């Protein structure tokens, strides 16, 4: 079972306690954007086989949203971090680089 | 290819079965093919078969990273039905179901199609309305389904508990001509027929690059060397995104693991397929006697081919309340397959931004039932550039807002 540490309340939460919120760090497009931007925002996802940055909510716990870095092949978790950021913090990037040298995910690496 | 028949069985019995030949060849790749299909699962092999059979395109290679039929084709719960709500879905799934009826004769290979009937239980008021609506829609589409009463459900499935602890059975959507087939045999039968037409099925050969020139596909790089082609069909389910990236475009897909499990074999106790979507469990009995059980999808992207353990408990709980007699059954095996989900839960059969490159993906949790129809439509699309079966499933529907919204395929019950 997938276990993530909630960065807010510090609990090691099982996946049954969590709700997945899909891909992280999406740039939102609304009224005024063109068809391609809106299409990509709504439907296009990285869906990588490997390092993935994603959103979770500690639904049956403190209820807060947070981010996680995880491998979709092995379910290895590289770390969790605040929901209030546009990019993974350096220590998360370093943790991923230690385990998966040369990784990249969208514009991050 | 030697024809399989009762006479052949008798002939071989008289000579100690020394005359059987391999069902398909395992050749080395040629330098060039007219069409390369990536992915030797059911959909890929069916595409190749109908390219050869319907359009005479037989200089075809089917390239497979692992072994033939080893992905989702060999991992599903073998249910065949076509009781969908939307017209484009009903058309392609009904085409598939009708092709399944004659598939054993067509391929000269017993795919063990068993039109035993598929029953989808309604256990809430909204499900009653939903399934009655589907039954009406199916009648207009020419798909034979009917709404049946709880008493009829009990007659068809004596082991069912109509008054479960959480949800009573209020009726069901019944498709008498749905059923099951032997999933491996579908892949093997298509592979044998393709090989007999002179097509090359190349296993243990991973594609690691797609070569393009001037926006058109010209070949693929594989672990067995570069192979040229005029047209490329990408039919690799959960890994379609990786192939698309090699070709330089993206697809609106997310890959997740879907689980299934089978019990120990028991005596015949249920001769129809039952799906209970509210409590979320579905079950049929295989010819070997195992109860074949469909589990849940994971809630997060992954490629693990095993799935989260707690879904087993949820699935088994649903089945125990629906069929109390299964509570003493032991489970034999559990496994997962990687399914590719689209935004509207309908598949993508389409041209792509790369000329000569076609994709057939996004079948999500319901691919097996559609194999012959999908191959038929995909072959037509690749051979002629247009197919009425696949038209509505094009890639640009997401941008244009032409969704084929089949929430029935939303991660449950196939």
Image (cartoon, coloured by chain):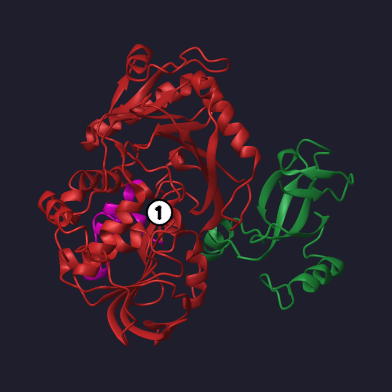
Chain colours: A green, B red
| Residue B129 locus on image (x, y percent) | 41, 23
- Residue A64 placement: quadrant: top right
Instruction: Please tell me whether residue B56 belongs to the stretch shown in magenta.
Output: no
Q: Please state the total of marks drawn on the protein image.
A: 1
Give the quadrant of the N terminus of chain B: bottom left
Can residue B66 be seen in this snapshot?
yes
* Majority secondary structure of magenta residues: helix
Residue displayed at 35% across by 49% down: B183
| Residue B239 locus on image (x, y percent) | 50, 64
Residue B51 horizontal side relative to residue B239, left or right? left
Q: Which residue is mark 1?
A: B73
Measured along the vertical axis of the image, is residue A106 above or below residue B189?
below
Q: Chain of mark 1?
A: B
- Residue A104 placement: quadrant: bottom right
Region rendered in magenta: B369-395
Residue displayed at 65% across by 38% down: B310
- Residue B201 placement: quadrant: bottom left
Of A85 and B298, which appears nearest the observer? B298
């Amino acid at each position: 079972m997938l276990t993530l540490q909630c960065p807010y309340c510090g609990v090691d939460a099982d996946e049954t306690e969590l709700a997945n919120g899909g891909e992280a760090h999406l740039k939102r497009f609304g009224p005024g954007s063109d068809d391609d931007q809106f299409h990509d925002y709504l439907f296009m996802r990285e869906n990588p086989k490997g390092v993935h940055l994603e959103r979770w909510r500690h639904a049956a716990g403190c209820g807060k949203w947070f981010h996680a870095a995880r491998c979709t092949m092995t379910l290895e978790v590289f770390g969790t971090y605040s929901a209030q950021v546009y990019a993974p913090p350096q220590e998360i990037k370093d943790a991923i680089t230690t385990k998966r040298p040369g990784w990249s995910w969208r514009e991050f690496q | 290819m030697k024809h399989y028949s009762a006479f052949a069985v008798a002939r071989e019995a008289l000579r100690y079965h020394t005359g059987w030949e391999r069902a398909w060849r395992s050749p080395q790749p040629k330098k060039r093919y007219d069409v390369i299909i990536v992915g030797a699962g059911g959909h890929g092999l069916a595409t190749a078969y109908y390219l050869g059979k319907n359009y005479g395109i037989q200089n075809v290679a089917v390239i497979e990273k692992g072994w033939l039929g080893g992905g989702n084709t060999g991992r599903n719960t073998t249910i065949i039905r076509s009781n969908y709500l939307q017209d484009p879905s009903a058309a392609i799934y009904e085409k598939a179901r009708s092709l399944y009826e004659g598939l054993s004769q067509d391929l000269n290979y017993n795919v063990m199609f068993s039109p035993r009937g598929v029953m989808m239980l309604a256990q809430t008021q909204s499900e009653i309305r939903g399934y009655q609506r589907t039954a009406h829609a199916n009648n207009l589409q020419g798909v034979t389904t009917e709404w049946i009463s709880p008493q009829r459900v009990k007659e068809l499935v004596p082991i069912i508990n109509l008054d479960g602890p959480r949800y009573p059975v209020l009726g069901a959507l019944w498709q008498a001509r749905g059923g099951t087939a032997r999933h491996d045999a579908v892949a093997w039968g298509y592979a044998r027929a393709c090989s007999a037409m002179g097509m090359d099925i190349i296993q243990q050969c991973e594609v690691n690059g797609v070569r393009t020139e001037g926006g058109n596909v010209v070949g693929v790089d594989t672990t067995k060397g570069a192979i040229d082609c005029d047209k490329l069909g990408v039919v690799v389910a959960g890994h379609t995104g990786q192939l698309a990236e090699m070709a330089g475009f993206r697809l609106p897909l997310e890959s997740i693991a879907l689980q299934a499990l089978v019990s120990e074999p028991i005596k015949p106790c249920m001769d129809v397929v039952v799906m209970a979507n509210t409590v979320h469990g579905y079950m049929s009995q295989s010819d070997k006697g195992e109860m074949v059980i469909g589990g849940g999808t994971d809630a997060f992207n992954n490629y693990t081919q095993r799935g989260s353990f707690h879904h087993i408990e949820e699935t088994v709980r649903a089945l125990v309340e629906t069929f109390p007699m299964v509570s003493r059954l032991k489970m034999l095996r559990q496994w997962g397959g990687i399914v590719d989900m689209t935004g509207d839960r309908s598949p993508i059969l389409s041209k792509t931004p790369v000329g000569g490159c076609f994709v057939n993906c996004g079948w999500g949790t319901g691919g097996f039932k559609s194999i012959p129809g999908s191959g038929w439509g995909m072959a037509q699309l690749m051979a002629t550039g247009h197919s009425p079966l696949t038209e509505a499933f094009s890639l640009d529907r997401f941008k244009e807002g032409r969704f084929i919204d089949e929430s029935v395929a939303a991660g449950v019950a196939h």
